[in-house]
Amino acid sequence: MKLSYTRTMVRAAIDGKLADVETIQDSVFGLHIPTAVEGVPTEVLNPRDAWADKAAYDKKATELAGLFNENFKKFSNVSEAITTLGGPLK
């Protein structure tokens, strides 16, 4: 992704321009992805759309979620409110 798109998205988030936009929810990570951000092509917003092989993306995303979950186990002193905040990654 071009750095200029990343900057545009960060600025939009900081300025509150994404508070009421339509989103789709990522099925693995649970993130809400805007369907449109002014100045950013819609085809770069959803990482899954950047992969020609959607099954390969799904497999890699699930693998990455597992790595995140495994890594987070190191933080046993974190309160349950924090560990469940985003829900479990699939």
Image (spheres, rainbow, N blue to C red):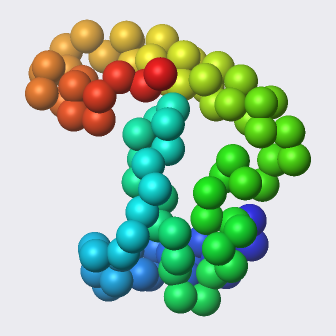
Is residue 14 shown to the viewer in this render? no
Image side of residue 12 versus residue 44, left or right: left
User: Where residue 85 sits in the image (x, y, percent)?
Assistant: 21, 34
Image side of residue 22 versus residue 68, left or right: left
Image point (24%, 24%), residue name: 83
Q: Quadrant of residue 50?
A: bottom right
User: Where residue 47 sits in the image (x, y, percent)?
Assistant: 67, 52
Q: Quadrant of residue 42?
A: bottom right
Image point (29%, 35%), residue name: 86
Q: Is residue 61 above or below residue 39?
A: above
Query: For this rendering, which residue is in front, 53 or 80?
Result: 53
Q: How many marks?
A: 0
Is residue 82 shown to the viewer in this render? yes
Query: For this rendering, which residue is in front, 28 or 73?
Result: 28
Q: Is residue 7 above or below residue 69?
A: below
Q: Quadrant of residue 64?
A: top right
User: Where residue 53 sits in the image (x, y, percent)?
Assistant: 85, 39
Image point (38%, 12%), residue name: 74
User: Where residue 17 sits in the image (x, y, percent)?
Assistant: 34, 83
Quadrant for the N terminus, please: bottom right
Query: For this rendering, which residue is in front, 40 or 54?
Result: 54
Q: Is residue 81 above or below residue 29?
A: above
Image point (52%, 76%), residue name: 36
Q: Residue furthest bottom?
A: 39
Image side of residue 23 versus residue 41, left or right: left
